[in-house]
Image: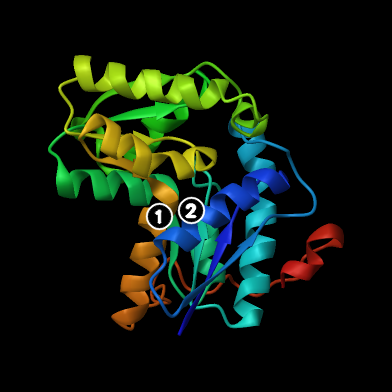
Amino acid sequence: MSLIQVINPNTSQAMTETIGAAARAAASPGTDIIAVSPSQGVPSIEGHFDEAIAAIGVLEQVKRGREQGVSGHVIACFGDPGLLAARELATGPVIGIAEAAMHTATLVATRFSIVTTLPRTLIIARHLLQQYGFTHHCAALHAIDLPVLALEDGSGLAQEKVREQCLQAKLQDGSGAIVLGCGGMATLARELTQELGMPVIDGVSAAVKMVEALVALGFGTSKHGDLARPIAKPLSEAFQHLN
């Protein structure tokens, strides 16, 4: 049996529940999901400043998950905050949802589009495309121009905006797949895939399946090279508990 820790790096409990539901729907029989979020940090992640704060919460949760004996970890924010640092700290595999979604999209289509929340986060998505080597696979990026937490306000407006942008991407971009660029969009993917008749990829589900596959193959995060355990050194004050 696998135990996968799915980390929502922001402090929104409603979003943690949304992400957890998507992860459980994707998990295989015999895989248990623990959906967690930090007790301190930012309520939503919408820029570099937010990501820097959220990365500490991610590391805290990875350390806690490792102590609980989880098989692997998912970082459920499309900026993949703290991903490489988390891999240093972890033993099992650690997958970010942007990384997972982009990889998955290239396996089912030659080009994909991304639909995310605020326009400012498009720049972060472009940085990740470059980092992961997918710039030439991405046809276009779209923003619904609503904040992350609009996905949890109960109005349905953000969900309708996601649908509209996905439809626009299908009609205009020449893409074969669409990547949803926020963990809070996770539960929309299956319905949109059916409605649009093309793969609409949620990174939470994709990341869960990747962790399951790596665990089944017997692979954890490499401890040879730059992802070896952090160099032992005294940490001061608020960071002592990360040792």
Q: Are marks 2 and 1 in contact (CB under 8 Å)?
A: yes
Tell me the quarter of the picture where residue 63 sits: bottom right
Regarding mark 1 in the picture, which secondary structure is present there? helix
Q: Nearer the viewer, residue 141 or 123?
A: 141
Amino acid type for the residue under numbered disc 2: Ala
Tell me the quarter of the picture where residue 45 sits: top right
Q: Which mark is residue 205?
A: 1
x, y percentage for residue 127? 39, 33
Tell me the quarter of the picture where residue 25 sits: bottom left
x, y percentage for residue 100? 35, 52
Q: Nearer the viewer, residue 170 or 191?
A: 191
Label 2, residues with CA under 10 Å away: few <14, some 14-19, many ≥20: many
Quadrant containing the N terminus is bottom left
Q: Which mark is residue 121?
A: none
Decide if residue 117 is in sight here: no
In the image: residue 233, left or right of residue 240: left
Circle 2 sits on which residue? 22
